[in-house]
Image (cartoon, rainbow, N blue to C red):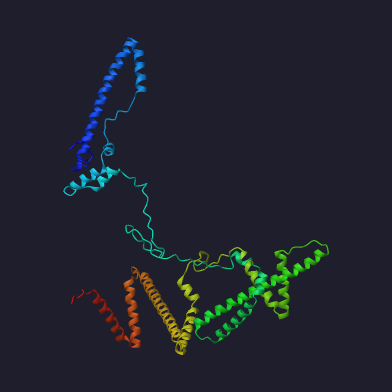
Amino acid sequence: MDSDSPSSEHGFSLISSDAKRTRKRKVEGKDNVRKTRKKKHKTDSDEKRKKVGDDPAKLDFEEAKDTESNSEPDNEEVTDEFVFGICDTDDITKSVSASGADIGFNQRRFNQVLYGDKDRKGSKKKVFKRANKNRPMEISSKKPVPKFRKAAPVKKKVTRDPRFDDLSGDYREELFSRSYGFLDDIKHREREKVEKSVKKEKNPEKKKELQFLLNRMKQQELSDNKKEQQKRIERDWKKKEQTRVKEGKNPFYLKKAERRKLELAEKYKELQKSGKVDAYLGKKRKKTAQKEKKKLPVQVTRDPRFDDLSGDYREELFSRSYGFLDDIKHREREKVEKSVKKEKNPEKKKELQFLLNRMKQQELTDNRKEQQKRIERDWKKKEQTRVKEGKNPFYLKKAERRKLELAEKYKELQKSGKVDAYLGKKRKKTAQKEKKKLPVQVP
């Protein structure tokens, strides 16, 4: 096999014996042409030397002219295109079919050598067509099918709002109010229905919702009446101005402040008819007073409990000064006890019972504090007498004070005969505390 053949590297020959012979002949012919060119060049150079002489500059000039006129590209490599131009494609395919069964035949390489590389970018995409318009479209199986695919084109519904669309024309308030005036009667009838349902409704939540709806409807009605009044005032003013312009006077355009004055004059006439002028003016004065009060500088309030100007807090002096508060609290507790007994609503009864328990706890804590103070006062008196006798003072500690409190409590329980009940409760509490301290028994 010839080493110059393009498919020698694949282990089989793509060129027949006739093609090989023609190729060899061509190569030998090219070698002969080169030899003749060399001989001719030698003879030409000898003749030039004889003509020009021994001057080297003239000799170089003559050689350069000849090379420019007689220069031809010298292709030594013999390409595959040249070979296949000589060879017949039938011979190549026959040789391939003979050897392709036994050897691993590479069809892609064969097509590449035979037809050349095709530009992939320039290759056109295959366009799938259908034989009949009623048949479904043929789609390539190589492309993955999308998740959301439109089976058939659906026209999108375009909604049109006549309020903001140019096709409906411009908005004219007077024309609209004349065309849709019947809506005011419907609103009035609806308000009357809601008023009746508010009176009949017994469920408090639903009643609250209906009342809110009713108030809203009333407010809307008031605002509509106010707008109607403004328009009526403007219409009347325009008519007056038109008559004045016809008389030859200059027109006076109604300003906001002037319109407000006319509205107030109308309102005053209505209030005079209904006899509510004084009530309206009273409300107006209250509002103006509140506005003026807000404009004033903030007055700093002083709490005597936390202010240094009131002096230091002395508990004894405070209890003596405000001792009457204990009597007021006691009377309030008695009132709450009576209302708990009379009340039938379970929710309200529960709230009152919670309030009563809280008042009792406050009273107990106040009594306990008073007891502690009394014990401390008695102890101080004793210590003062002992110091006068020349003995060292003994300051009352927390534990000692606790013992004295228990002794006082024991005396009170003995008087009421509740010592055994108190001790029983105390034993239960201590037992529970001891039980918590014990290690947990694993079953």
Q: Residue furthest left?
A: 102
Q: Residue at x 59, y 68 (%)?
A: 163
Q: Quadrant of residue 381?
A: bottom left
Residue 89 visible? yes
Q: Residue at x 44, y 65 (%)?
A: 153
Q: Quadrant of the N terminus?
A: top left
Q: Residue at x 54, y 87 (%)?
A: 200
Pinpoint residue 289: horizontal percent, then vertical percent: 65, 69
Left or right of 264 in this view: 118? left
Q: Quadrant of the C terminus?
A: bottom left
Q: Residue furthest right?
A: 247
Left or right of 348 in this view: 38? left
Pinpoint residue 328: horizontal percent, then vertical percent: 49, 81
Residue 284 visible? no
Q: Residue at x 38, y 74 (%)?
A: 376
Closer to us: 382 or 82: 82
Total marks shown come to 0
Q: Residue furthest top?
A: 54
Left or right of 367 in this view: 45? left
Q: Quadrant of residue 179?
A: bottom right
Closer to us: 37 or 289: 37
Pinpoint residue 258: horizontal percent, then vertical percent: 73, 66
Pinpoint residue 405: horizontal percent, then vertical percent: 34, 77
